[in-house]
Amino acid sequence: GSGAARGIGQNPSAATPGRTCLGLLIVTGETERKEHFNRKTFVLRPTMKLRSTAQFESVFGFRCSRSNQFMAVHAAPNTIGINRIGLSVSKRVAGGGVMRNRIRRRLREVFRKNRPALPTGFDFVISVLI
C-alpha cells in the first residue's frame, strides 16, 4: 500500500516556552521490495545507534514525542552533530525474538533511507506500540 505520513510540530508539553519539537516524518505501511545490494552499503554504523540506558533516558527526559497507533517517536538534540536511533520493541508487542528483530531491522532501514531528509544532531527513540 501507499505510505501514510504524520508530521511532528510544536511540542505542547514543553517546559520551556518557545521550545519546538523536530519536524519529523513518520512513515508507516511501506511495501517491501526484494533487491540485490551490497550489504556493506546498507549497514547502519554503530555510532548511529543508541546503546546505553543513560542515552535512552536522556531522550525520554527531553519530553519531545509524537505517536500514532503503531509507534511513538521521541526526539532530543545531541552534541555530536549526527542523528542516532534507539529502538524499543517489547516481547508483549511482538512475541518471539525473530519477530522483534524483524521489526527492528525494518525500522533501522526506514531510518537509514530517510536520514538525509532529517535535520542533523538529534537522537531518536522509536517505541513500537502494537
Image: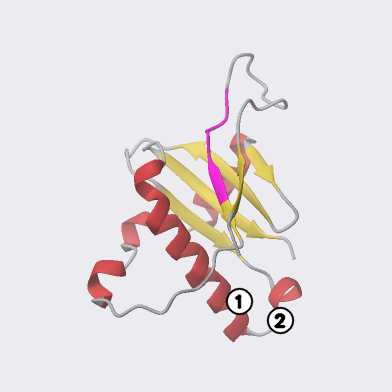
Q: Does the residue at mark 1 contact the one at mark 2 (Cβ under 8 Å)?
A: yes
- Front residue (pair 114, 72): 114
Percent of width and height locating residue 15: 67, 22
Q: Is residue 125 above or below residue 93?
A: above
Question: Residue 96, image x and y in percent?
Answer: 66, 85
Considering only vertical position in the picture, is 124 above or below 120?
Answer: below
Would you identify the image quadrant in which residue 30 lies? bottom right
Counting residues from the start of the chain, the first of labels 1 and 2 encountered is 2
Quick one: label 1, few (<14), some, or many (20+) residues within 10 Å?
Answer: some
**SS of the residue under disc 2:** loop
User: Is residue 51 visible in this depiction of the protein?
Assistant: no
Say above or below: 61 vs 115: above
Position of 64 compared to 31: left or right?
right
Residue 60 % position (x, y): 62, 44
Give the residue displayed 64% in from the left and 14% down from the top.
17
| Residue named by callout 1 | 100
Q: Which residues are magenta?
A: 20-26
Disc 2 target residue: 95
